[in-house]
Image (tube, grey):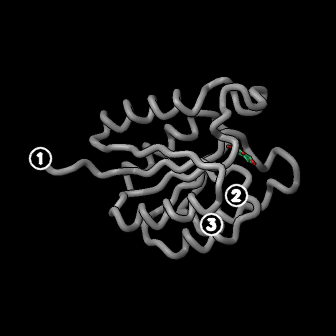
Amino acid sequence: MAAKPVIYVLNGPNLNLLGTREPEIYGSTTLDDIAGQLEDQALALGLSVDVRQSNHEGHLVDWLHEAQAMGAKAVILNAGAYTHTSVALLDAIKAVSVPVIEVHLSNPHRREAFRHTSYVGQAAHGTIAGFGALSYTLALDVAAKL
Ligand code: DQA
């Protein structure tokens, strides 16, 4: 049987603390909960997901390169605060041809001005933000259709 197309789901700094981190903004769902939901959803869509998290910018760059090398169908990327700072991530997304879907739990445009700039969004295929854990679910549905 052919291997299922894989979607990389990459999460940046502080997202390991989801569930307890500022729950009034990010909700009470943990990253493990989100990973479990995405695995079930992927199964139903005939896909597989590889969900990862790192607090280190370079890991996210390496994983974008890896997604390309491994022939991933798409990358769902919540780069956390690196969204707003990282030219390295912008360059990495431009350097690969795999489509990248930017996701955020919160809607950065409703928050502080420094969150209104997204380097990731300047190269991403599209962005889904503001729907809590549902942002990831929506992104996986989109990834399946790309
Ligand atoms: C976030 C929004 C970012 O501004 C913030 O730095 C995060 C989480 C979100 O998912 O809403 O760490 O990416």
Residue 50 horizontal/vertical position (percent): 41, 46
* Crowd rating for badge 3 (residues with CA inside 10 Å; few <14, some 14–19, many 20+): many
Tell me which residue sits at (65%, 60%) in the image: 57
Pointer 1 residue = 1
Foreground pick, 18 / 104: 18
Q: Counting residues from the N terminus, which is met first, the one under dot 2 or under dot 3?
A: 2
Q: Quadrant of residue 132?
A: top right
Q: Are marks 2 and 3 in contact (CB under 8 Å)?
A: yes
Pointer 3 residue = 89
How far is the residue under mark 3 from the one under mark 1?
A: 35 Å
Residue type marked 1: Met
Q: Residue furthest right?
A: 113
Label 1 CB less than 8 angstroms from ligand 1? no
**In-image side of 88 versus 76 (left or right):** right
Tell me which residue sits at (65%, 45%) in the image: 104
How far is the residue under mark 1 from the one under mark 2?
A: 38 Å
**In-image side of 114 versus 108 (left or right):** right
- SS for dot 3: helix
Residue 74 horizontal/vertical position (percent): 42, 57
Q: Counting residues from the N terminus, which is met first, the one under dot 3 or under dot 1?
A: 1
Pointer 2 residue = 83
Q: Is residue 133 above or below residue 47?
A: above
Q: Is residue 136 above or below residue 145?
A: above
